[in-house]
Every structure is written in structure tokens, then in C-alpha cells.
Image (cartoon, rainbow, N blue to C red):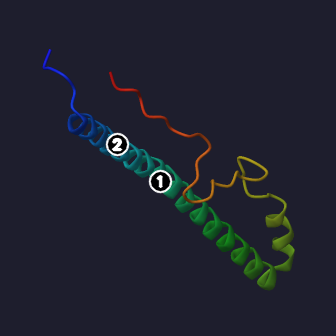
Amino acid sequence: MTGPLTVQALVDKLTARQAAADAEIADLRDRMAKPTDALVAAERARERWAGTRETVLALVAEEHPDQAAATRLSPPPTSRSSPPSPPPPGRCARRSSVRPWR
């Protein structure tokens, strides 16, 4: 044993544990933001490709009305009817908890 716990030592321990919890929260937020950013980038790319496809179809329809009907018969592939939207920035579905110290 090291002796009785002083008020200053207790405050120092609490300060250190709070700093560790703050660091863990910052790390978790950073790790959560990376997949969200990647999802947003992928959704933007999909929208650009869809816009390009529509432009090409419109140009084909102007020049070759007989071929435009055939190209419109095949809809673009989709994985879902409507993609889920990401959570609002700064919010997450679950709250993280800090493990108790022993």
C-alpha cells in the first residue's frame, strides 16, 4: 500500500481518467467519420454516373429516335430501391460508454 489517498491524488486520477475518456471519444468519432465520408463519396459518384447515363440517352434520342426506345428498356442496376441516408453529422445511433477503471 502507498498510504492514504489524498484529495489532490484523487483529483489527479480523475483528471487523467477524464482525459483518457476524451481521447477515446475523439478516436471513435474519427473512426466513425471515415466510413461515412466514403459512403458520401460513393453516393456522389453514383449520381454522376446516373446523370451521365441520362445525358447519353437524351443525346441518342435526339439523333436516333428509333434506337432510343431500345436503350431505355434496360434500367440501370440498383442494389436497393432507395438507399439509407447517413445519420446527421455529430450524431450516432448508440452512445459509447467508458469502461470503469479498477
User: At 44% from the left edge and 50% from the top edge, which residue is drawn?
Assistant: 29
Name the residue at the bottom extreme. Answer: 62
**Which amino acid does the dot numbered 1 rest on?**
Ala
User: At 73% from the left edge and 73% from the top edge, which residue is drawn?
Assistant: 54
Q: Secondary structure at mark 2?
A: helix
The image quadrant that residue 3 belongs to is: top left
Q: Which residue is mark 1?
A: 33
Residue 6 percent across, percent down from the top left:
21, 32
Q: Nearer the viewer, residue 14 or 46?
A: 14
Q: Secondary structure at mark 1?
A: helix
- Residue 27 placement, left or right of 43: left
- Residue 66 placement, left or right of 97: right
Residue 1 percent across, percent down from the top left:
15, 14
Q: Which residue is mark 2?
A: 18
**Which amino acid does the dot numbered 2 rest on?**
Gln
User: At 62% from the left edge and 67% from the top edge, which residue is drawn?
Assistant: 49
- Residue 93 placement, left or right of 77: left
User: At 79% from the left edge and 58% from the top edge, which residue is drawn?
Assistant: 75
Spatial distance from mark 1 to mark 2, Cα to Cα?
23 Å
Instruction: Say few, some or many: other residues with alpha carbon within 10 Å of mark 1 (under 14 / 14 to 19 / 20 or more).
Output: some
Residue 91 percent across, percent down from the top left:
58, 53
Instruction: Say few, some or many: other residues with alpha carbon within 10 Å of mark 2 (under 14 / 14 to 19 / 20 or more).
Output: few
